Image: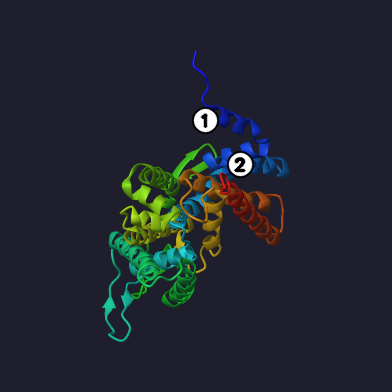
């Protein structure tokens, strides 16, 4: 028979001295997905009881999934940035600018100011490639300003929020580019030619419709969850967000990590613009006006720490579903839009307070 060591005795006494609240705190610290999963389940039950029977119908669930697709896609990029202890306030306006450029270049082409060069409408494939390059460029701007000039991510993206918003309005002249847009020659022209709007297509399972955009968003979560958990780049992201100086001393190129994260986020925003085109069947500077803060809400509710270094993408996906569920559930319950914003605000405060409390484990 083996005798217990002093360390074993101390560990046993420590575990016995924990209150139920302490045990909950440690559980949430170890499994950050638990809290958003509980919120999702409870919220679903509450809205089912409050509603008139429409909330849990397959058709409503399908609509919520379609609404979640754009938010969830953009929230992947936001998660990567927040994991590095940064934040992106311009995610929505960057996505809007990219999807405007894609749609209008395919529909109308462009005229280069001053030089007077006229660019003919381009093929949708080249439109998407242009969107990808633009997304990478916007991400490189953010990463460069943060790493090269040492500017806080909050200030950088607050500034670019207004820059991208203004550029989108100026570029589109605040006009919507619809599926059938009029070109310069006066003929009706299909913006998508089958490709730009393909993510809006889908399959019907009974009365529930699942679009290609939803499937693409889920596939991206699988890919990036693997990258974060099983690649050196993913581990470097967590290390940089947890303690950038310690990561640098350990040999990690933290500056390179940050630039790559912002550029990948920009790429994801471009994909989000493509999903938005399929979702709305149009491109507008007024699309998804609240999505900037909604992505942050989804990430924080999903258990990713605003202080960086802790969180999982599956939590972000659940957080995006919670945001959409609140919006849809409160609407079906007949709640005024002002109170819907109040509910989302309270959710944010609760999530941040919970995150701060969870991070005190071991302190």
Element type where label 2 sits in the image: helix
Residue 278 visible within the image: no
In the picture, measured across the screen, residue 27 lies left or right of residue 85, that is right
Q: Is residue 168 above or below residue 354?
A: below
Q: Position of residue 162 (x, y in %)?
A: 49, 74
Q: Quadrant of residue 259?
A: bottom left
Q: Quadrant of residue 192?
A: bottom left
| Residue at image point 52% right, 52% down | 305
In the picture, measured across the screen, residue 116 lies left or right of residue 286, that is left
Pick whichever, 277 or 345, lies toward us. Answer: 345
- The crowd level at tag 2 (other Cα within 10 Å; few <14, some 14-19, many 20+) is some
Q: Position of residue 196 (x, y in %)?
A: 37, 57
Pick whichever, 45 or 344, lies toward us. Answer: 344
Q: Quadrant of residue 21?
A: top right
Q: Which is nearer the N-term, disc 1 or disc 2?
A: 1
| Residue at image point 33% right, 59% down | 260
Q: CA distance from mark 1 to mark 2?
A: 23 Å
Q: Kindly report which numbered mark, 1 or 2, lies closer to the viewer in this rendering.
A: 1
Q: Position of residue 197 (x, y in %)?
A: 40, 55
Residue 245 visible within the image: yes
Q: Position of residue 13 (x, y in %)?
A: 61, 30
Q: Determine which residue is flagged by label 2.
A: 25
Q: Is residue 16 above or below residue 270?
A: above
- Which mark, by number, is residue 7? 1
């Amino acid at each position: 028979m083996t005798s217990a060591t002093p360390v074993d005795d101390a560990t046993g006494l420590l575990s016995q001295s924990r209150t139920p609240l302490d045990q909950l705190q440690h559980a949430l610290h170890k499994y950050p997905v638990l809290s958003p999963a509980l919120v999702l389940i409870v919220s679903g039950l509450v809205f089912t009881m409050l509603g008139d029977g429409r909330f849990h119908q397959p058709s409503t669930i399908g609509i919520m999934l379609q609404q979640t697709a754009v938010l969830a896609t953009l929230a992947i990029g936001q998660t990567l940035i927040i994991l590095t202890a940064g934040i992106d306030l311009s995610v929505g306006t960057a996505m809007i600018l990219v999807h405007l450029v894609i749609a209008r270049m395919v529909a109308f082409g462009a005229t280069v100011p001053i030089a007077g060069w006229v660019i003919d409408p381009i093929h949708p494939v080249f439109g998407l490639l242009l969107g990808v390059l633009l997304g990478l460029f916007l991400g490189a701007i953010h990463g460069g300003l943060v790493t090269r000039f040492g500017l806080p991510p909050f200030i950088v993206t607050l500034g670019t929020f207004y820059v991208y918003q203004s550029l989108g309005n100026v570029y589109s002249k605040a006009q919507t580019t619809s599926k059938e847009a009029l070109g310069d020659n006066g003929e009706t022209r299909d913006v998508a030619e089958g490709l730009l709007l393909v993510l809006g297509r889908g399959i019907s399972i009974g009365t529930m419709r699942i679009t290609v955009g939803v499937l693409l968003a889920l596939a991206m979560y699988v890919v990036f969850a693997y990258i974060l958990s099983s690649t050196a780049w993913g581990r470097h992201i967590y290390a940089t967000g947890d303690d950038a100086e310690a990561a640098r001393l350990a040999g990690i190129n933290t500056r390179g990590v940050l630039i790559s994260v912002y550029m990948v986020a920009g790429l994801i925003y471009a994909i989000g613009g493509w999903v938005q085109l399929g979702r709305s069947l149009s491109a507008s500077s007024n699309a998804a006006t609240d999505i900037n803060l909604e992505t942050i809400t989804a990430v924080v509710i999903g258990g990713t720490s605003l202080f960086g270094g802790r969180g999982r993408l599956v939590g972000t996906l659940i957080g995006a579903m919670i945001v959409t569920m609140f919006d849809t559930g409160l609407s079906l319950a007949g709640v005024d839009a002002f109170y819907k914003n109040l509910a989302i605000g309270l959710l944010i405060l609760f999530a941040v307070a919970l995150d701060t409390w969870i991070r005190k484990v071991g302190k």
